Image (cartoon, rainbow, N blue to C red):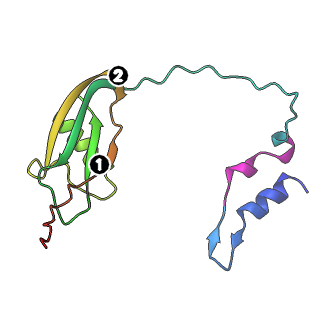
Amino acid sequence: MGPDFVRAHAVGALPSLGVCLYSPLFETSLDQRAMSEDDDITEIASPPVMVAETNRIFRLSPAFDDLSQTSRQIALVPAESEEIARAIATAADALGRDWQDERAFIADSIETEERHVIGDVIFRSTPNAAPMKRRKRD
């Protein structure tokens, strides 16, 4: 049973699902993939990956607390400007919030000693302040 047999069956269709499967794993023969522990693995030198960094972090938070919610979502975004931070947060938000709306979300920025990768976003839920309850007097 050679690699052609394995490839033919790996690429074969699943008639019950109407799907055709393909995996690049089957492009090499089984003999080529079976390496012993004694084989040397050659390392390929590659240039380091350069990423944009900044010391500035923008904290985007709701302009008004919605007391009907138990928590509120904030975004911590390293960026060079507020506009870029808002665009990055909007693109990264899985819930589809529009962080670019300046009436809905306010922005504060802080400078830190650490460097942060531009484009990283941290969404964090913070609890809302509990509403004051009146005590009953006996």
SS label for mark 1: helix
SS label for mark 2: strand
Looking at the image, residue 78 lies above or below residue 124: above
Q: Position of residue 108 (x, y in %)?
A: 16, 36
Q: Residue at x 57, y 21 (%)?
A: 46
Write down the residue under mark 2.
114
Residue 81 in view in this figure:
no
Real-space Cα separation, disc 1 to disc 2, in angstroms:
24 Å
Give the left or right position of residue 114, taking residue 35 as reference. left
Residue furthest toward the left? 103
Quarter occupied by residue 117: top left
Q: Residue at x 66, y 63 (%)?
A: 21
Q: Label 2 amino acid? A: Glu
Q: Label 1 amino acid? A: Ala
- In the drawing, what numbered circle is on residue 91? 1
Read off the magenta span.
Answer: 22-31
Viewer-proximal residue among 92 and 20: 92
Viewer-proximal residue among 105 and 34: 105
Q: Position of residue 111 (x, y in %)?
A: 23, 24
Give the left or right position of residue 32, taking residue 121 as reference. right
